[in-house]
Image (cartoon, rainbow, N blue to C red):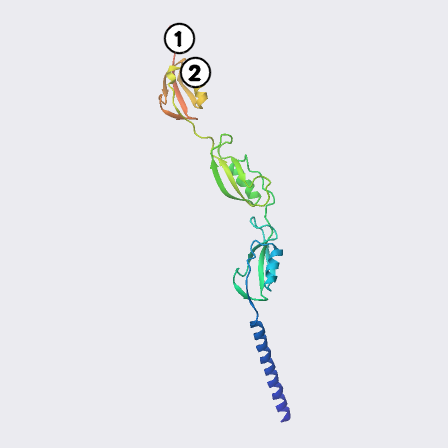
C-alpha cells in the first residue's frame, strides 16, 4: 500500500513539475519584447547585421543570387517584410547578391542585328530593348550604339540602337528634257537617283517620273533618248 502511494506521489510531483515548467516557459517566451522588422534590402551585410542586432534579432543568409541591380554582398530580399512586428530573438533570413553574372559587356556596335542576337545568346546577355534610329553612317539593321557600352561592368542586359538607314531625301524632279545626257547624269548623281535609258541617241525627249513630281533618293529615273537632227541627217 505504501508502495502504491509512493508511486502515486512521484507521478503527481512529475506532472506538477511538467505543468510548472510549461507555464514558466510560456510566460518567458510570451514576455519577449515586440520589435519592428528593419528594411534590410539594398543594405550591406555589415549594415544589415548592425540593424538586426540593435533590435535583438538574428540574421541568417539563406541564399546568394546574381543581380545586375544590387552590388555584390548587399541584401536583395528578406523573408519577413519590413515594418512587421515580431518578438525579440527571431531570425531574419536574407538573400544576398553575388553581383552581375556578366563581368564585362562585349561590343555589339557594327554588327548586323542578327549577329548581335547570336552574340548575346552566346554570352547569356538579354537584349532588353532595340531602338531604331536613322543613320547616315551605318547601313540599315546595323547596331549603331549600345547601353551599357563596351567593357562596362555590371550588367547582363543590353539596349541596342539599330540603324534604319539614312533619312529619305525628297526632291522635286527636274526637267531633264532641257539637259544633255551628261548634264542629266551629273544631276542624277547629285540627288542620288538611278538612271535607266530607253532608246538610243544623245537627246532626252521624255522622262518618267514627269518634271515636277516628288522623288526621293534611290528612285529610278527613266530617260527616253533620240538622236539629234544633226545626227539623223548625218546618217542619211
* Near-viewer residue (9 or 4): 9
* Near-viewer residue (18 or 5): 18
Query: Looking at the picture, how far across and down is residue 154, in whole percent?
Result: 58, 45
- Residue 37's disc number: none
Residue 163, placed above or below residue 29: above
Residue 177 seen in this snapshot: yes
| Residue 35 location, quadrant | bottom right
Q: Residues within 10 Å of mark 2 (few under 14, many from 20)?
A: few
Say whether residue 203 is left or right of residue 75.
left
Disc 2 + disc 1, Cβ < 8 Å: no
Task: Point out the image quarter for the C terminus.
Answer: top left
* Near-viewer residue (5 or 205): 5
Which of disc 1 and disc 2 is earlier in sequence? 2
Q: How many marks?
A: 2
* Near-viewer residue (184 or 234): 184
Query: Looking at the picture, how far across and down is residue 1, in whole percent?
Result: 62, 94
Question: Measuring 59% from the left and 85% from the top, which residue is drawn there?
Answer: 12
Residue 75, placed above or below residue 119: below
Q: CA distance from mark 2 to mark 1?
A: 19 Å
SS at mark 2?
helix
Which residue position is annotated with label 1? 231
Question: Measuring 59% from the left and 80% from the top, which residue is drawn there?
Answer: 20
Query: Looking at the picture, how far across and down is residue 141, in whole percent?
Result: 49, 35
Which residue position is annotated with label 2? 183
Query: Looking at the picture, how far across and down is residue 145, in whole percent?
Result: 53, 37
Question: Measuring 59% from the left and 61% from the top, which residue is drawn there?
Answer: 52
Q: Residues within 10 Å of mark 1 (few under 14, many from 20)?
A: few
SS at mark 1?
helix
Q: Nearer the viewer, mark 2 or mark 1?
A: 2
Residue closest to the far bottom:
1
Residue 27, placed above or below residue 133: below
| Residue 179 location, quadrant | top left
Amino acid at each position: 500500500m505504501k508502495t502504491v502511494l509512493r508511486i502515486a506521489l512521484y507521478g503527481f510531483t512529475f506532472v506538477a513539475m511538467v505543468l510548472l515548467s510549461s507555464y514558466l516557459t510560456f510566460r518567458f517566451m510570451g514576455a519577449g519584447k515586440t520589435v519592428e522588422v528593419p528594411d534590410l534590402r539594398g543594405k550591406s551585410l555589415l549594415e544589415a547585421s548592425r540593424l538586426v542586432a540593435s533590435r535583438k534579432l538574428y540574421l541568417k543568409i539563406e541564399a546568394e543570387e546574381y543581380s545586375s541591380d544590387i552590388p555584390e554582398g548587399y541584401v536583395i530580399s528578406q523573408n519577413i517584410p519590413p515594418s512587421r512586428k515580431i518578438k525579440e530573438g527571431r531570425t531574419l533570413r536574407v538573400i544576398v547578391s553575388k553581383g552581375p553574372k556578366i563581368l564585362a559587356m562585349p561590343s555589339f556596335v557594327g554588327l548586323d542585328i542578327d549577329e548581335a542576337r547570336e552574340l548575346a545568346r552566346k554570352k547569356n546577355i538579354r537584349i532588353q530593348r532595340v531602338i531604331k534610329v536613322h543613320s547616315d553612317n551605318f547601313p540599315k539593321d546595323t547596331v549603331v550604339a549600345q547601353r551599357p557600352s563596351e567593357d562596362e561592368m555590371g550588367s547582363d542586359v543590353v539596349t541596342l540602337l539599330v540603324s534604319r538607314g539614312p533619312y529619305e531625301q525628297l526632291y522635286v524632279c527636274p526637267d531633264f528634257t532641257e539637259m544633255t545626257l551628261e548634264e542629266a547624269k551629273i544631276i542624277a548623281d547629285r540627288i542620288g537617283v538611278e538612271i535607266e535609258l530607253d532608246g538610243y541617241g544623245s537627246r532626252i525627249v521624255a522622262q518618267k517620273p514627269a518634271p515636277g513630281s516628288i522623288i526621293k533618293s534611290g528612285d529610278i529615273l527613266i530617260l527616253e533618248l533620240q538622236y539629234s537632227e544633226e545626227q539623223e541627217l548625218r546618217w542619211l
